[in-house]
Image: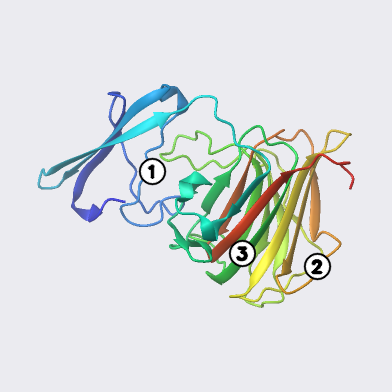
Amino acid sequence: TIADPERLAQATFAVNDGAERALTLGSDLHRLARPGDFNAEVAWNEVTPGDNSLILRATTLHNERFRTEVRLVVHEGNGWPLPWTVDFAAVQHLPDVVQIVDGLWHSRPDGVYTAEPYYDRVLCMGDNSWTNYEATLRLTVHSFTPSAPGPPTYDVTHFGVAMRWRGHHADGLQPSRKWFPLGAQGEFLLAADPGACQWRILFDGTRDKRPQYASGRNTLTQGQRMLVRTQVCTLPDGRSRYRFKQWQDNQAEPETWDVEGYEVDDVPSGSLCLVAHNSTVTIHDVCVVPLDGPPFA
């Protein structure tokens, strides 16, 4: 974030002595939430193994000049192991266990917290070696912005879990907003009526496929811990199956899934994303395990 963005005449970034490029400053009503927020998006083909340099420059309307250099160290050949378990209450340094994609996240004694709720505040774990897996997470929803047309909710407020995600894709914006192709995202839709929350599955945005909604409703108690379990696997017939369910921490796990959906010609692998969309949440712990058993279990 750049303080006092109204004083700025220009802000730029450059990688390894490359050409300077303009930084988009927030709010862009999407990934950049607050005035002065920025994201210097660096592509893999711009960096080399070992040390790299990112130069940030800002010039004020009074021609004051500021420069900051960030050292980027690129390691080749690293993979993200599976199973993967995180107790956020015990984490001292968040980037050791997750990739912070968007948003300001703070560590608290009981987990990691969305300090500034807005559009798709995202934590990511895993990589393109993750294919069939199940995730279980414990979280608390503290509050949320009611959904309404236009920014920042765009008619939906949720806590979501995306699977087989491969990062933002180039779309001509800085930073990129294109969140697909991916596998699918399960969105636990938050409603003013605590008994009217509902799951939906949002499929790959490159296909003209409508979201799939659960037939039933879920109950949410704000400020109380709840659990979410999700699954993705490729079936023998080639389709990918996505499953989602939720229950309160003081209840037994339901035997059935709240919603499940199927995708044809799916993205074969990708990471897991935890997505707080206009909701204030604390994520307490996450456990991701491979699905090696019978795919119809």
Q: Which residue is drawn at 80% across and 49% down?
A: 261
Query: In the rendered view, would you say 45 is above or below 175?
Result: above
Mark 3 element type? strand
Provide the residue designation for mark 2.
216
Query: In the rendered view, would you say 250 is above or below 134?
Result: below
Kindly report which numbered mark, 3 or 2, lies closer to the viewer in this rendering.
3
Outermost front residue: 90
Pinpoint residue 103: horizontal percent, then vertical percent: 45, 54
Q: Residue 236 carries which label?
A: none
Distance from the alpha carbon under mark 1 to that under mark 2:
39 Å
Of the residues shown, which amino acid type is indicated by label 2? Gly
* Mark with earlier residue (3, 2): 3
Query: In the rendered view, would you say 21 is above or below 225?
Result: above
* Mark with earlier residue (3, 1): 1
Provide the residue designation for mark 3.
139
Mark 1 element type? loop
Q: Is residue 87 visible?
A: yes
Which quadrant of the view contains residue 35? bottom left
In this view of the protein, which residue sits in the foreground, 93 or 105?
93
Distance from the alpha carbon under mark 3 to that under mark 1:
27 Å
Kindly report which numbered mark, 3 or 1, lies closer to the viewer in this rendering.
3
Mark 2 element type? loop
Pinpoint residue 73: horizontal percent, then vertical percent: 39, 30
Q: Which residue is drawn at 45% across and 22% down?
A: 45
In this view of the protein, which residue sits in the foreground, 215 or 86?
86
Q: Residue 39 carries which label?
A: 1
Q: In the drawing, does residue 86 fall left or right of residue 134? A: left
Pinpoint residue 224: horizontal percent, then vertical percent: 62, 74
